[in-house]
Image: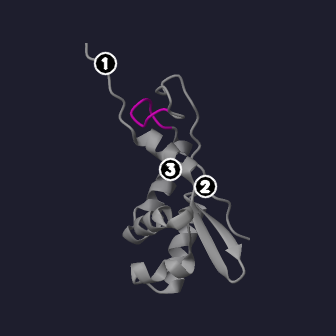
Amino acid sequence: MPAAPTTLPLVATAGATAGACCAPLTGEPLSAETAAALARTLKALADPARLRLLSLVAAHEGGEACVCDLTEPLGLSQPTVSHHLKVLVEAGLLTRDKRGVWAYFAVVPETLNALAAVLVTPTRPAP
């Protein structure tokens, strides 16, 4: 049974900026649990092949890509590409939809937006 995707346990706080769903990393100290979840997501992205895969899927026509379309641009074997895609799915960054013998992947915008909201540095008003 595949592992459930990891989601960032980010909640709106009083320190969240207008329009953002979550407090920025610099807004308040992270709890141990939030830091561990955020580290897992960042670790999934901390690989050049996975970053390229995320970019290839996001830029692909229709916003989704078949695994068969991703091996050649990376120059990696299909099992290696499948492993990297599995890591991105488990991190909640991609979804996987099995159609016949092929798997199609799409970016999860909510996860990327939550990650961006955590990493943003809020601008402070001038004194």
Side of 107 relative to 76 (left or right) = right
Pointer 1 residue? 125
Instruction: Mark 1 vs mark 2: give the one in front.
Output: 1
Residue underneath mark 3: 112
Q: Residue furthest bottom?
A: 77
Counting residues from the N terminus, which is met first, the one under dot 2 or under dot 3?
2
Whole-Å distance between the Cαs marked 2 and 3? Answer: 13 Å
Q: Which amino acid does label 3 sit on?
A: Leu
Q: Residue lying farthest top?
A: 127
Residues at discs 1 and 3 in contact (Cβ within 8 Å): no
The quarter holding residue 108 reads: bottom right
Would residue 35 be visible to someone looking at this image? no
Q: Name the residue under label 2.
A: 6
Inspect the magenta stretch and tell me whether residue 25 lies in it. Answer: yes
Q: Residue at x 25, y 12 (%)?
A: 127
What residue sits 51% from the left and 79% below the top?
Answer: 69
Whether residue 17 is visible, yes or no, is yes
